[in-house]
Image (spheres, rainbow, N blue to C red):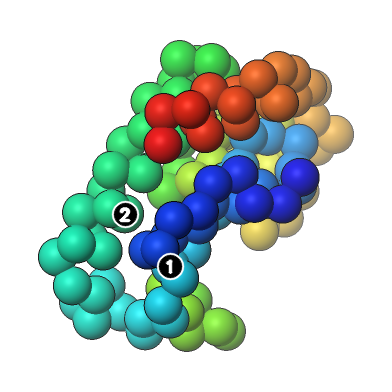
Amino acid sequence: MGVVYKNRLIRVEVEESEVPWLKILLQKPYRELLDANDEVKAEILRVLDIINKEMIAVYNPDKINIISFGTALPHLHWHVIARFRNDSYFPEPMWGEKQREGAYKLKNFKSFLKSVKNKL
């Protein structure tokens, strides 16, 4: 599915997964958030807010994980992941050890993406 949205500051991409998972990447590679200017920081928060609210409205997850790291690739970015008690990894991170064969089935993802894109 690739890129959901982009502008001159950020782009939003899909991470293929059993759960709703989007990534926010900056168009300019910043190593740390403090390196970004106020316009970029405001755009990050705007996009995080929209994705977070849409995930809650559409999926009603048990938790939303918002992760920013980049140890292996020092290019600041965020993962926004809806988590469910019955997904394969809960309560571990999605990069952790699989806990079970999850019972969660991702539904309405194209509709969710369209809604996010329209609000962005």
Q: Secondary structure at mark 2?
A: helix
x 55%, y 83%: residue = 73
Tell me the amino acid under the disc marked 1. Answer: Leu
Answer with the quarter of the image where residue 38 lies: bottom left
**Residue 61 as seen in the image, left or right of residue 28:** right
- Category of crowding for the residue at label 2, using alpha-carbon neighbours closer than 10 angstroms: few (below 14), some (14–19), many (at least 20): many
Q: Work out whether residue 103 or residue 34 is closer to the camera in this orientation and state it.
A: 34
The answer to which of 97 and 72 lies nearer the viewer is 72
Can the viewer see residue 57 in this picture?
A: yes
Which residue type does callout 2 highlight? Ile
Find disc 2 in the rendering and name its residue.
44
Q: Is residue 86 above or below residue 71?
A: above
Q: Position of residue 55 (x, y in %)?
A: 49, 26
Left or right, 53 with respect to 13, comes to left
> Residue sitting at 85 percent across and 34 percent down?
101
Above or below, 97 against 16 in this view is: below
Which is nearer the N-term, disc 2 or disc 1? Answer: 1
Work out whether residue 77 can be spotted: no
Judged left or right of residue 78, residue 20 is right
